[in-house]
Image (cartoon, coloured by chain):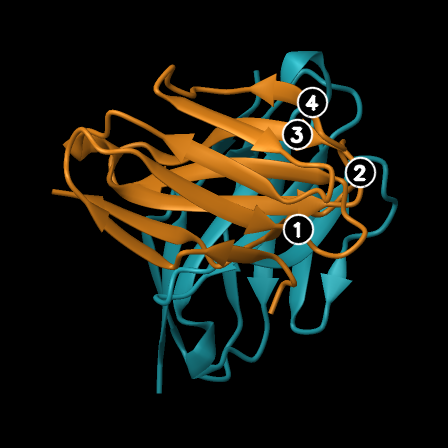
């Protein structure tokens, strides 16, 4: 158990809908990273927050947004869902930001868009 | 930009034997790090081991060790005394050293390891 929690574990929804994925980092970790894992794209970085501030964006679609709250939990919002958004979404947390801080991953949320 | 290459889509090993999973990286940064993660069929990503570019010794964590060859830009994972529970997908990754995506991980395509009894 990495200490990072993600809810829900599974999510099945229809095209055009909106969903919210939630992540609670390990106690004491200030950084939260979101990644998407799909068969065709592999593991892709989406967005990074550090202590409530957005620090970096990767290949995140405009239909996707995220935030990190004062208690450091984070939410990833996916809207106008398409079939291609079906993937495993991970959040990872680390104490800081940078080269030497291990990122500990949550169990992931498996999103299926039908 | 960072790039990680894992050239072995699949590897097989007999239980109790050692296995090496290959990883080569491409980075122009002077200081960088390399991570290995394990992803079992259940889906979670498990941190295994970390190697910093300026670490003088190869990293070791229990049965996992890194064969780090800086000149060759390779950071191969060695698993000793393989166990059935080692069967999983293994990813090599490196974090961005700067710029606008500092700290984000770039992953290789992964290697599926199967341990035979």
The cyan one among the chains is B
Are the residues flagged by discs 3 and 4 in contact, CB closer than 8 Å? no
Query: Measuring 79% from the left and 40% from the top, which residue is drawn there?
Result: A100
Label 4 to label 1: alpha-carbon separation: 19 Å
Point out the image quarter for the N terminus of chain B: top right
The residue mark sitting in front, 2 or 1, is 1
Q: Local crowd at mark 3 within 10 Å, few (<14), some, or many (≥20)?
A: many
Is the residue at mark 2 from the same chain as the one at mark 4? no
- Residue beneath disc 2: A96
Chain letter for the residue marked with disc 3 in the picture: A
Identify the secondary structure beneath mark 3.
strand
Q: Is residue B99 left or right of residue B74?
A: right
Is the residue at mark 3 from the same chain as the one at mark 4? no
Label 3 to label 1: alpha-carbon separation: 11 Å
Quadrant of res A63? top left
Label 3 to label 4: alpha-carbon separation: 11 Å
Q: Position of residue A22 (x, y in %)?
A: 50, 47
Q: Depth check: A82 or A102 in front?
A: A82
Q: Is residue B83 left or right of residue A94?
A: left
- Residue beneath disc 1: A25
Q: Depth check: A31 or A79 in front?
A: A79
Identify the secondary structure beneath mark 2.
loop
Q: Is residue B34 left or right of residue B45?
A: right
**Closer to the N terminus: mark 2 or mark 1?**
1
The residue mark sitting in front, 3 or 2, is 3
Point out the image quarter for the C terminus of chain B: bottom left
The residue mark sitting in front, 4 or 1, is 1
Chain letter for the residue marked with disc 4 in the picture: B
Identify the secondary structure beneath mark 4.
loop
- Residue beneath disc 3: A49
The orange one among the chains is A
- Residue beneath disc 4: B102
């Amino acid at each position: 158990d990495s200490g990072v929690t993600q809810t829900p574990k599974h999510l099945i929804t229809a095209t055009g809908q909106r969903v919210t994925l939630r992540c609670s980092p390990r106690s004491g970790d200030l950084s939260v990273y979101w990644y998407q894992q799909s068969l065709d794209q592999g593991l892709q970085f989406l967005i990074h927050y550090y202590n409530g501030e957005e620090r970096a964006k990767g290949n995140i679609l405009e239909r996707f947004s995220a935030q990190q709250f004062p208690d450091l939990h984070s939410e990833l919002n996916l809207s106008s869902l398409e079939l291609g958004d079906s993937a495993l979404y991970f959040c990872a947390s680390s104490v800081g930001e940078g080269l030497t801080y291990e990122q500990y991953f949550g169990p992931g949320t498996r999103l299926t868009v039908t | 930009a960072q790039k990680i290459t894992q050239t072995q889509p699949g590897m097989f090993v007999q239980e109790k034997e050692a296995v090496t999973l290959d990883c080569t990286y491409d980075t122009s940064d002077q200081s960088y790090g390399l991570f290995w993660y394990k992803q079992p069929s259940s889906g979670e990503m498990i941190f295994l081991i970390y190697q910093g570019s300026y670490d003088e010794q190869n990293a070791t964590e229990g049965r996992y060790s890194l064969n780090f060859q800086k000149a060759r830009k390779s950071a191969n994972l060695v698993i000793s005394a393989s166990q059935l529970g080692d069967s999983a997908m293994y990813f090599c990754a490196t974090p961005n050293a700067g710029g606008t995506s500092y700290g984000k991980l770039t992953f290789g395509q992964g290697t599926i390891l199967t341990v035979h009894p």
